[in-house]
Image (cartoon, rainbow, N blue to C red):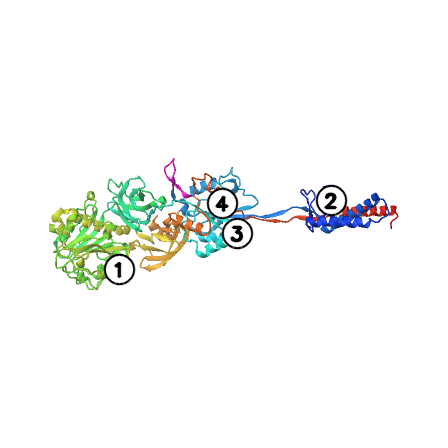
């Protein structure tokens, strides 16, 4: 449109170069009104000149001019305008919630034809996004796609419009959320879309959440008319998962010992059979295996693996080693939690044992012989009732009893037989107590008919007995049978049967008809008197199997850094009548090694302990440092600094330990990060003694959703049904289109279109003024011609 035309029509506000202009009316009269107006205007004009004394042609011309003038005036009354059509589109919003929690790493999808492995949920998710059509990348002016990732929180996912760069319409990082909080994610979606037309919400998730939607949230979704369309990920039927929850293993062990590894398996709905293996990571050799059969209802199960480092099967040598516990066989939901690594240091030296007995008895005779001939034990035996000329036995004979803590510290384990308490001075008893409490030494108390434990009441060693009350114990009136408890199985002791039999306890020891399997003398210890920290390894069972008269036979108890063992009989030697030395030797050697495992720590001049071995985020970790060798001449400082390192060697925290006893310091701190944390002594003088010694603690989350990783499709289905949405399977046999394209078609268009045209009046323009002026001049001229005023 030229400038002259714009001036001629009186256009000032419409943009220059506007196209698609339309003629509209300010007052839009109906068609019949226009017809009446034309008739009236024509009638008035004809009536005005009906009696004019002039020719018909002149009258018709003048009437026509007046008719046009009147019609132009009526057009001006109608208000003609030029309109430039314009409209404003408020696009609707489709919110897509994409699960970014760690459960997306679970592999429970269809098996990959090339590898045979099950596909992870994350891979399925990326395939769904990659197959999405162009409408999800460029939805047009009437729609906006709000991509949100959710896990512990909600984050906006960046869109990718160039499909040549990324097949997915959004950029995705690896899923690392520790929790799936679905309800807060839906609430955040409603908040972000407040005041905007929400066409629908798409949830792509496995449904595993600790925050399911409540009734109030469902009502808010219904009020927003936001149906939830769901794409379920993961297996529809629960597979179940078994995880290695906890591994208990000694930090140091004797290379000639059978090292038990206690494994706690956490079960979440898995049933079936699988194998648990203990593997040497250096050479890949399997140290031990056990077959596990688990029921889906069982929440946990304990298993014991035993490594024999010095055996051919173990291939162990002295020094630092790393073993692994792994679950093998069967379908498992989260393979990442089927493996646990165990650092251990093997010490190749014999177990040093001091055996002190009051008088000769059969148990003393055979136990002494066992200690002398066992190559993994270095023994010193003292028979206190012997004459001066009696040559004390053992492969390291002693001329006298140790006098103080320093001399008792030369031993890993002390066995006290049936001797009166006054045979040992109070100083010697204090030294034995300190050996157990501080250095982690072991103490075995072998019950007897004369003095053990009767004469030890109100002595420094009384607190070390695993039961309380009067120590004047009665004996059972009838012979008893020995029977191990599950605690013994857990600790890897009292496994007396041949390995080929697959049994832990020989059947011969459960049959009283053999005679030799009966224990003729057993002390009666009431269960009510057992201390809370004590555990029963074996029980004395009547020959008739009556449960009412079962009493503890072998009792163990932790005391300080060490361990106590009380045996309420001295009749174990009778088993020699049935199997020779075999059963007797296995019984004693396993118990001796059990107590000696803690004592191996006493080889170090200083010890650092951090516990628990596995702790939850936000829970305190107790760190203890003990100076075990006081003969080094080290002046103990008032406080000790300990540094906590992460796996990359970065210092997380410096902990100041305060004195908690003689040559002992302790303190606590709260880790604020996940993973393995190593604690090392930073005090210069003590750090030299400690060398590269460290104490490891594994920090885990209490709300790790991989602990229960099965998909929860019923929750997703309920969410869709209650909000008016639908469940959309990834593959639909009746519709080959990608699932997101099917969802896009099902979502209604709720975009709001608002017309905002630009209008400008033209009846006030020069064009109308000129027309009226010309027509009026024409009529006036005609009237002058006919001399009509």
Of the two numbered discs 3 and 2 on the same chain, state the one appearing first in sequence: 2
Q: Secondary structure at mark 2?
A: helix
Contact (Cβ within 8 Å) of mark 2 with mark 1: no
Considering depth in this image, is 2 or 705 the residue closer to the camera? 2
Dot 3 alpha-carbon crowd within 10 angstroms: few under 14, some 14 to 19, many 20 or more: some
Of the two numbered discs 1 and 3 on the same chain, state the one appearing first in sequence: 3
Residue found at the very far top of the displayed protein: 114
Is residue 157 shown above or below 545?
Answer: above
What residue did someone put label 4 on?
Answer: 746
Of the two numbered discs 2 and 1 on the same chain, state the one appearing first in sequence: 2
List x then y, in percent, for residue 166: 49, 39
Task: Quote the CA–CA distance across marks 3 and 4.
Answer: 20 Å
Q: Secondary structure at mark 1?
A: loop
Q: Secondary structure at mark 4?
A: helix
Residue 706 appears left or right of 534: right
The mark closer to the camera, 3 or 4, is 4
Q: Is residue 179 visible?
A: no
Task: Quote the CA–CA distance across marks 4 and 1.
Answer: 65 Å
Which residue is rendered at x = 24% and y = 45% of the image? 256
């Amino acid at each position: 449109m030229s400038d002259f035309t714009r001036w001629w029509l009186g256009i000032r506000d419409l943009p220059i170069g506007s196209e698609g202009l339309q003629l509209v009316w300010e007052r839009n009269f109906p068609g019949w009104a226009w017809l009446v107006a034309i008739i009236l205007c024509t009638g008035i004009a004809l009536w005005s000149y009906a009696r004019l004394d002039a020719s018909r042609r002149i009258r018709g011309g003048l009437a026509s001019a007046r008719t046009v003038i009147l019609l132009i005036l009526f057009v001006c009354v109608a208000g003609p305008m030029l309109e430039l059509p314009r409209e404003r589109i408020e696009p609707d919003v489709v919110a897509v919630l994409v699960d970014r929690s760690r459960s997306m790493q679970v592999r429970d999808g269809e098996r990959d034809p090339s590898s045979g492995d099950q596909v992870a949920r994350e891979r399925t998710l990326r395939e769904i996004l990659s197959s999405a059509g162009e409408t999800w990348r460029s939805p047009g002016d009437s729609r906006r796609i709000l991509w949100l990732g959710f896990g512990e929180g909600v984050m906006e996912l960046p869109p990718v419009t160039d499909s040549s760069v990324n097949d997915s319409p959004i950029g995705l990082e690896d899923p690392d959320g520790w929790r799936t909080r679905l309800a807060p994610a839906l609430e955040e979606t409603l908040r972000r879309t407040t005041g905007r037309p929400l066409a629908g919400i798409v949830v792509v998730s496995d449904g595993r959440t600790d925050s399911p939607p409540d009734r109030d949230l469902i009502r808010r979704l219904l009020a927003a008319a936001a149906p939830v369309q769901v794409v379920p990920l993961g297996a529809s039927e629960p597979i179940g998962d078994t995880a290695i929850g906890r591994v208990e293993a000694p930090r140091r062990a004797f290379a000639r010992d059978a090292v038990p590894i206690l494994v706690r398996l956490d079960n979440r709905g898995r049933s079936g059979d699988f194998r648990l293996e203990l593997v040497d990571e250096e050479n890949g050799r399997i140290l031990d295996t056990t077959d596990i059969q688990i029921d889906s209802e069982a929440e946990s199960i304990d298993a014991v693996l035993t490594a024999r480092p010095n055996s051919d099967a173990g291939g162990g040598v002295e020094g630092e080693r790393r073993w692994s516990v792994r679950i093998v066989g069967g379908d498992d939901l989260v393979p990442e939690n089927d493996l646990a690594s165990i650092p251990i240091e093997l010490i190749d030296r014999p177990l040093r044992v001091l055996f002190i007995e009051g008088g000769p008895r059969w148990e003393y005779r055979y136990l002494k012989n066992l200690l002398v001939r066992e190559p993994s034990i270095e023994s010193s035996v003292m028979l206190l009732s012997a004459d001066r000329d009696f040559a004390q036995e053992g492969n390291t004979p002693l001329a006298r009893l140790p006098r103080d803590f320093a001399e008792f510290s030369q031993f890993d384990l002390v066995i006290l037989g049936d001797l009166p308490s006054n045979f040992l001075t109070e100083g010697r008893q204090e030294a034995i107590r300190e050996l157990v409490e501080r250095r982690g030494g072991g103490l075995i108390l072998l019950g007897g008919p004369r003095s053990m434990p009767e004469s030890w009441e109100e002595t420094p060693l009384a607190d070390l007995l695993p039961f309380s009350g009067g120590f004047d114990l009665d004996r059972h009136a009838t012979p008893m049978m020995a029977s191990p408890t599950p605690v013994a199985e857990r600790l890897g002791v009292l496994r007396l049967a041949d390995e080929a039999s697959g049994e832990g306890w020989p059947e011969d020891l459960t049959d009283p008809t053999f005679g030799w399997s009966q224990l003729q003398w057993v002390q009666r210890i009431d269960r009510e008197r057992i201390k809370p920290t004590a555990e029963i390894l074996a029980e004395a069972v009547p020959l008739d199997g009556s449960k009412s008269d079962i009493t503890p036979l072998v009792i163990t108890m932790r005391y300080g850094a060490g361990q106590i063992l009380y045996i309420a009989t001295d009749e174990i030697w009778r088993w020699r009548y049935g199997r020779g030395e075999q059963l007797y030797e296995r019984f004693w050697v396993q118990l001796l090694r059990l107590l000696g495992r803690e004592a191996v720590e006493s080889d170090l001049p200083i010890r650092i302990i951090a516990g628990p071995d596995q702790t939850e985020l936000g829970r305190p970790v107790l760190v203890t440092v003990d100076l075990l060798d006081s003969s080094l001449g080290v002046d103990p400082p008032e406080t000790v600094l300990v540094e906590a390192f992460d796996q990359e060697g970065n210092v997380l925290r410096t902990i100041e330990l305060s004195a908690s006893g003689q040559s002992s310091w302790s303190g606590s701190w709260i880790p604020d990060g996940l993973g393995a944390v190593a604690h090392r002594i930073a005090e210069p003088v003590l750090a030299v003694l400690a060398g590269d010694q460290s104490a490891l603690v594994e920090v885990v989350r209490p709300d790790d959703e991989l602990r229960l990783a099965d998909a929860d499709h019923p929750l997703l289905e309920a969410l869709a049904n209650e909000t008016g949405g639908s469940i959309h399977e990834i593959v639909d046999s009746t519709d080959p289109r990608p699932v997101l394209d099917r969802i896009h078609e099902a979502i209604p268009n709720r975009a709001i279109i608002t017309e905002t045209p630009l209008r400008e009046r033209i009846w006030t323009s020069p064009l109308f003024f000129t027309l009226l002026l010309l027509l009026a001049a024409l009529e006036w001229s005609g009237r002058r011609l006919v001399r009509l005023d």
